[in-house]
Amino acid sequence: MDLLQNPNLPTLHSQVFGREGEIESFAADLMASPLVSIVGPGGVGKTTVAIEVAKAVHGQFVDGVCFVDFATLQDPAMVPVAIAEALGLKTGASPVLDSVCASLRDREMLLLLDNCEHVVETAATSAYRILSAASGVRILATSREPLGVNGERVRALGGLSFPPEPIGVRAQDALMFPAIQLFVERAKRRKETFALRDQDAPAAAEICRRLDGIALAIELAGTRVDTFSVDGILEQLDDRFRALVGPKTATERHRSLVATLDWSFELLSPGEAELLNAMSVFAGAFSGEDAAAVAGTSTVDAVERLAQIAAKSLVTISFAGDRTWYRLLETTRSYCVMHLRATRRLDAMQRRHAERVHTILRTAGEEWRRTPAGDWGKRYRSVLQDLRIALVWAEARDQKLLIELTTAATILWNHFSLTEECREAILRAIGQLNHLGLEGTATEMRLQTFLSGAAVFTRGPGPEMLMAAERALDIATALDDTEFQLRSLWTLGSYKIFAGKYDEAFDHMKAFLAIAEAKDRTAVPGGEAMLATAEFYVGDLDNALRRVEAHFNPNENALEKPRLARFQFVSNSTFGVILSITQWNKGWPGRAARTIERVVQDTLRTGHKMEIASSLVMSGCLIALLRNNRDDARRYLDILDHVLDESGLEVWRPVALHYRGALMCSEEASLSEGLEMLKTSLRGLDSKGQKLRRAYFLGVLAEALAKAGHMEEAISTIETALAISGKNNERWCLPELLRIHGSVLLAQARPAEAESRFIRSMTVAGDLGMLSWQLRAANDLAEFWQTASRGHEAYAMLMPIYSRFAADDDTGDLRRAHLLLQATQ
């Protein structure tokens, strides 16, 4: 059999991972089009995939497959000669390409033209001439840019997939991804005993991520396991171009990652190379305007050059809405940074980058007031990565720019609930105010305001928060700045509520509303939400209910409104939270459950972690537990734990632990473990100065202690809870505390005192309009009377309370009341 029937395809020395879909798709393309080009960055595996495609379709061509490698060509004019030699033709006096076309005119075969990028024009001309002359020929080309021939099907080949979340990934799960499979296969070649362990999997996943799934780079990394551990290879990636060097037997351009990128950069014009190097200061996606600002050129020029660079597979292009975004692969970015550093231009580019980030943040601040929150968040989320890089540079090089960046970025951190990141950045900026002469200015006012807001959710209502809020209010008042007077007063009101000083919160919120109603009525809902919160905690349910019902919109989509979380929280969600717990207290548990579920789902859509956590902490978890709906409680707690892990909202961690402990205490088998959680949660709240709902939390602990038989500790705990309730005027849960006191007294064989407490609980609940608490106390009293042969009295007392609930209400208390009524008839 001659060469034309026997494919001269190179032998692959390793298994092909994760390319089955591409191979099948590209093979189908070849049957439908005379020319298919596989394009992608250097080292991604274009040749490997092309060879597998050729193998797959070989049987479709009577005259087989011919492989032509242009990699070693120095002179583009030699392209026809290389094709002729691969076909086994002798090159005589006539033009070589004419001879090639004549030879192929009556053939049915596949030509695989490999590595066309550096001879792309001649390769394109040759391909066009061959296809025009030989209808039975198909061409499969690999290149870093398309050939540009009419009818060409261009198929981009991306990197191998890798675990999207490296942290915590297990070996078994990581090995489902082709990039990891390739890494392990290469590692085993170098070290036969190598096996991916669970402790290695996160580092292996991060290696593949940082190498963009590029097959060559991953292969080179895998070969280093005989010298370094997997963790060691990851550390070496900071100097990846020196670390990732292959064997001398490999082709020159594949011996190292830097050689592969050198090969790619030789294809660029000086202007393209200069622009690409400048773009390496961006952490992720950037626009044409961003590129122009950093490169110091016009947007038109930048976009034209980026299009040319993208055609050579050194920049990727994506589209979002009406905007075009560009991105460098991580390996390319690192290579370009190396070039900037070598030419001493890195610092200048980093300054331009930081200045560009500041410009973007200022624009974001202007748009925040009028753009729907969902659209705003999508547009500016990607700025976070570049912001972090810019802040690091500015802290070392330009403290004034550091302060300007931090001030402008607070709105971004708040929108995405990055409270701890915000707090740390603000503290660094505040540390520079004095020597820059910015104390007492609007700049300090903004920084102190946002520091106080961030501190309450990371450090709790402590001195740092209070001092920052009071300092901000003083400056805002002196400058007559309405917006920041409102923000500071709102934060001070929050401080009082978190500190359990509910009555004192009224003063701040009334001052807030006076300013809002006089100067900025758009801020009124924010003040009304906080005022309703204070009213609820002091037991003024009717006023709280009136206030929230006037503002809460159950059908509102927060993402469609601008200025998401202007005062830390989304006002509509805050109204929904207060409405739901007020509904529960008023004796409408079904309505309460529906309201908070609607709020939780809306906050989940916003993705605003502070808002999600707030809805679950303040109402969702509590109502699920009060209704004795364990499934809802577990679902809400799982969401809450996940959000707290992601957001750093540590002030709510002890509250989440309390709810988890209360859930466990509801089941006998886990009572002991749950009791310890309740105690730990209270210590955590103490450490953060968090007094919100402290009386209620102590009441839950007292009931669990009594259930576990710790009577002396239970009575001491509930008495402390009642004392705190009285001191702080925390009446929203007063009937429940009285009921728990009665149940502990009853367990201590003090029936007369217990009965008095149950009756007192019912009376207070009735006076305050708290039907749900009244039912709980009535249940305890009815059960006590039943055991004392007073069933008729128990029925007469319980039935009127039970009958006031709606038919679709379903709680553990109602089910218990139903059973008691049946037993006492």
Image: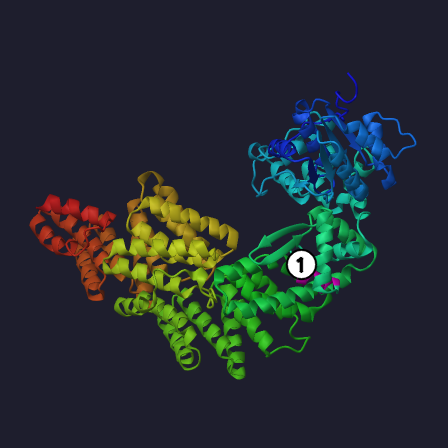
Q: Nearer the viewer, residue 781 or 626?
A: 626
Tell me where residue 462 appears, x and y as whole percent: 49, 66
Q: Quadrant of residue 83?
A: top right
In magenta stretch: residue 18: no
In magenta stretch: residue 289: yes
Q: Considering only vertical position in the picture, is 229 above or below 740?
A: above
Q: Which residue is mark 1?
A: 389
Q: Residue at x 40, y 62 (%)?
A: 691
Q: Quadrant of residue 93?
A: top right
SS at circle 1: helix
Quadrant assignment for the N terminus: top right
Q: Residue at x 50, y 50 (%)?
A: 645
Q: How many marks?
A: 1
In this picture the colour scheme is rainbow
Side (left or right) of 635 relative to 381: left
Mark yes or no: residue 395 visible: no
Q: Considering only vertical position in the picture, is 494 above or below 261?
A: below
Report the span colored magenta: 287-295
Q: Residue at x 77, y 59 (%)?
A: 346
Tell me where residue 229 appears, x and y as whole percent: 70, 36
Mark yes or no: residue 426 visible: yes
